């Protein structure tokens, strides 16, 4: 083992916390858990406690922690070629672009690294399409977004967030965005003007608490966009790649977008890989110099992206997500309805909402004590988004552990 590895292994959980507190900005509030090893759906702390990872890095580890096929492809690539600039061609990038366009049935791709970058890229493409193709007057383009959206953390993106904390202290913000209530098609219609370039939404709002729009909304949105010559952009960064039991969540209503943003599972939990994929007419508005990223599309990211997609197909993870998600949801629905307000989900994106008055802090701790990593999103909803590789025995183990945790908290609370 390397000397660096020895030094890392020598650190105690307390050392890790103290260094993070002393040297890191405090923009997260982590669970009191120090992980040292992962494997498939499992994670382990230093004393060997095993946890089922139901946060799954917010869907980024869809293929399972340290997926062997993707890891091997990455390690192989690391011995051949790392970052070279976009000033040159590489076979890895070409093959990645072809693979992702074929998988999404869209025409062209702009590779980036993180989700927020993919969103920024899509916004730039939409604006430039608005000016150069649709004919919107200079600097007048409008983009419509939804309440309770989550698209990332850049200044522009938080500028159209409706979460107070995401904005406070960070203004002034980028103009040109209109917010309408999520799932309200009439509000969308009313917000459209001749200057509307695009509508950007999540098909299911994961960070907001796994919120679904009314049935038919996605299809209606597609129709409204067609009627008004407005681009439809789905943010599939969290819902994409099988998470909801289809390759992409828009497929539940056949509401094919003009562009979609992808990240998270595209990197298989190993490397940041993101992309905007879209129709040629939109994507080709970018000319050399319009946009770029030093690491975007590099050979390592490209190989990881290809292997991540191929692994999803090879292992049938989309179908498995649908089957295991149905199972998880039906078991959760058997829980005590004096504790559970609602179970919402599609595929392996399941939210367990507890009633007001249930101590969610204590419940989070109880989940951990019982070997389940999950965190509260908004609306008192706990997220269950394990890797899409879980089989029935892991699903039933999640159910058993969650039940024990719920029982331990509600027994003492006298529910
Ligand atoms: C995570 C997420 C993002 C942002 O991705 P980052 O890689 O964290 O920048 C954007 N949109 C959705 C729906 C997400 O879940």
Image (cartoon, grey):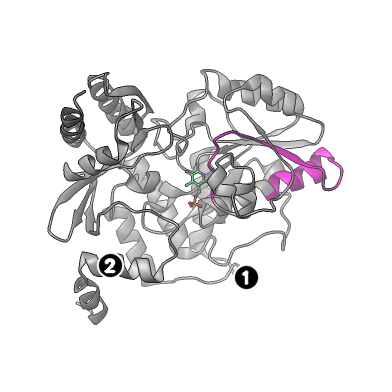
Residue 264 placement (x, y as % from top left): 44, 49
Identify the magenta region.
Answer: 124-152
Numbered disc total: 2
Horizontal side, residue 81 vs residue 197: left or right: left
Label 2 CB, ligand 1: below 8 Å? no
Sequence-earlier tag: 1 or 2:
2
Q: Nearer the viewer, residue 60 or 205?
A: 205
Horizontal side, residue 109 vs residue 4: left or right: right
Residue 238 placement (x, y as % from top left): 45, 41
Picture residue at 63% right of the left edge, 62% below the top: 292
Residue 373 lies in the magenta stretch: no
Is 15 above or below relative to 361? below
Is 9 above or below relative to 213? below
Residue 373 placement (x, y as % from top left): 26, 45
Is 109 above or below relative to 319? below
Is 107 above or below relative to 39? above
The quadrant the N terminus occupies is bottom left
The CA distance from mark 1 to mark 2 is 40 Å
Q: Quadrant of residue 230?
A: top right
Q: Quadrant of residue 343?
A: top left
Q: Nearer the viewer, residue 10 or 356?
A: 356
Picture residue at 72% right of the left edge, 59% below the top: 290
Q: Which residue is mark 2?
A: 16
Q: Which residue is mark 1?
A: 87
């Amino acid at each position: 083992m390397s000397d660096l590895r020895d030094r890392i292994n020598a650190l105690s959980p307390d050392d890790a916390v103290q260094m993070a507190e002393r040297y890191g900005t405090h923009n997260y509030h982590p669970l009191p858990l120090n992980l040292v090893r992962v494997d498939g759906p499992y994670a382990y702390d230093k004393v060997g406690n095993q946890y089922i990872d139901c946060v799954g890095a917010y869907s980024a580890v869809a293929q399972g922690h340290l997926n062997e096929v993707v890891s091997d492809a990455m390690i192989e690539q690391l011995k051949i070629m790392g970052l070279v600039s976009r000033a040159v061609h590489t076979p890895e990038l070409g093959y990645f672009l072809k693979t992702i366009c074929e998988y999404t049935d869209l025409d062209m791709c702009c590779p980036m690294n993180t989700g927020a970058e993919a969103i920024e890229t899509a916004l730039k493409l939409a604006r430039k399409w608005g000016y150069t193709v649709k004919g919107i007057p200079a600097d007048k383009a409008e983009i419509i977004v939804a309440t309770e959206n989550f698209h990332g953390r850049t200044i522009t993106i938080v500028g159209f967030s409706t979460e107070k904390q995401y904005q406070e202290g960070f203004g002034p913000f980028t103009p040109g965005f209109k917010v309408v209530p999520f799932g309200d098609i009439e509000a969308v219609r009313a917000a459209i003007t001749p200057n509307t370039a695009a509508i950007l939404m999540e098909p299911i709002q994961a960070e907001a608490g796994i919120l679904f729009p009314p049935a038919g909304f996605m299809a209606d949105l597609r129709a409204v966009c067609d009627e008004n010559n407005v681009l439809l952009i789905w943010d599939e960064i969290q819902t994409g790649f099988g998470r909801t039991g289809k390759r992409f969540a828009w497929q539940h209503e056949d509401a094919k977008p003009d562009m979609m943003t992808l990240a998270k599972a595209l990197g298989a939990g190993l490397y940041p890989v993101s992309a905007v994929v879209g129709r040629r007419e939109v994507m080709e508005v970018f000319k050399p110099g319009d946009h770029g990223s030093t690491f975007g599309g590099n050979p390592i990211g490209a190989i990881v992206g290809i292997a991540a997609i191929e692994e999803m197909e090879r292992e049938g993870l989309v179908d498995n997500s649908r089957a295991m998600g149905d199972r998880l949801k039906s078991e959760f629905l058997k829980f005590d309805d004096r504790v559970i307000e609602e179970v919402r989900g599609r595929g392996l994106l399941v939210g367990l909402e507890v009633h007001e008055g249930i101590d969610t802090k204590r419940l989070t701790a109880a989940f951990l004590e019982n070997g389940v990593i999950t965190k509260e999103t908004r609306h008192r909803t706990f997220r269950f988004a394990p890797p899409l590789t879980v089989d029935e025995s892991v699903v039933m183990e999640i159910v058993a552990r969650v039940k024990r945790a719920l029982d331990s908290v509600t027994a003492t609370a006298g529910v």
